[in-house]
Amino acid sequence: MYKQLIRPLLFRIYAEKVHSLIKNTLRYGFIIPGVKQIIASFYQINDKRLEREVFGLKFKNPVGISAGFDKNAEIYNELAAFGFSHIEIGTVTPKPQDGNPKPRIFRMPKDKALINRMGFNNGGIELAVKNLKKRKTNAIIGGNLGKNTLTANVDAVADYVAVFEGLFDEVDYFVVNVSCPNVTDLCELQDQDYLEEILFAVQEKNKQKSNPKPILLKVAPDLNNQQLDEVIDIVSKTKIQGVIATNTTVTRETLKTDYKPIGNGGLSGAPLKNKSTEVIRYLATKSNKAFPIIGVGGIFTAEDAIEKLDAGADLVQVYTGFIYEGPAIAKKINKALLKRI
């Protein structure tokens, strides 16, 4: 029903307005007694055979929601009811910021893709913490860390440390995001020197805690093999717990849609599938599976998720696939995984 009836109606409305509509529908709909239980009974699959222990945390199943869908930690409780084992909130920056000018997100149905140039629009640390204190779910919550656009790259370390400190008591793991193509000069922070400085600084703060938490690095799909080798080296040096592969891509290969009027932005969805899988496979193989990997990019079906897991991912996350395939995507993937077992 979602793809035949609901999605065509939603796709008539500007994407960012639809996102607000869905967010408000979930927030207010779940206030009605019994709604959460009905949703959970239909969409959740609770089976111990699906459980995964990754970087010291126990996940009920391998399927989560990637950062960007719940930037300000407003609907993570509701999203968990749809069968996702983990929800990554953010990207969170120290101060609130509006992001890039609208329109800034574009659907490409012919390609089952999105192009976005949101620009880390979010309400900052204070709002995220306020919302995270309303946590009612036992799903794993990740915090995606970013810097404010007006913060120069030479000063970026302070921003990442500030968000880490601010979110520490509220989330279960952290992701350092330096690979988003929609923030001016952010990708420069993927250079080895910048990246090591940020990760060492965050790790130093982590070590000072009585209960250190996993720190992961989110990488771009557009890195060459030499850069991926550097990622492996950086993970080893800084002793972070894992990698998320991958963020959105700036390439426009094989697109059927005329993307030139859209302009710049990160491409996600089906065109990213093979590229992200190859990054996962390279990192897993070249490192001899030295660290866990969360696979993201182009997951629409159970087969797509299994392909990522077979390539070396320990967990997977969806975003664009959730928008195109609907709320049953985690259920479908988990059912297929059980059949495979």
Image (tube, rainbow, N blue to C red):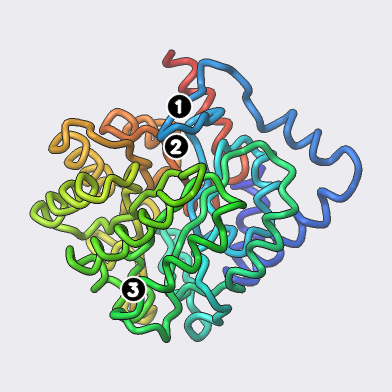
Quadrant housing the N terminus: top right
User: Could you tell whether 37 is left or right of 102 in the image?
Assistant: right
Residue identified by numbered label 2: 301
- Residue 217: percent from left, percent from top: 33, 53
**Amino acid tagged 1:** Glu
* Residue appearing at x 57%, y 68% in the figure: 15
Q: Secondary structure at mark 1?
A: strand
Using the rendered view, name the quadrant where residue 283 is placed: top left
Given residues 213 and 131, the one toward you in this image is 213
Q: Which mark is residue 259?
A: 3
Label 2: how many Cα within 10 Å (few below 14, some 14–19, many 20+): some
Using the rendered view, name the quadrant where residue 287 is placed: top left
Can see residue 192? Answer: yes
Is residue 159 placed above or below 7 in the rendered structure? below
* Residue appearing at x 40%, y 83% in the figure: 151
Spatial CA distance of label 2 from label 1 is 23 Å
* Residue appearing at x 34%, y 78% in the figure: 264
Can see residue 112? Answer: no
Label 3: how many Cα within 10 Å (few below 14, some 14–19, many 20+): few
Q: Secondary structure at mark 3?
A: loop
- Residue 129: percent from left, percent from top: 65, 62
Counting residues from the start of the chain, the first of labels 3 and 2 encountered is: 3
Spatial CA distance of label 3 from label 1 is 41 Å
Given residues 121 and 251, the one toward you in this image is 121
Spatial CA distance of label 3 from label 2 is 25 Å
Residue identified by numbered label 1: 53
- Outermost residue on the right side: it is 33
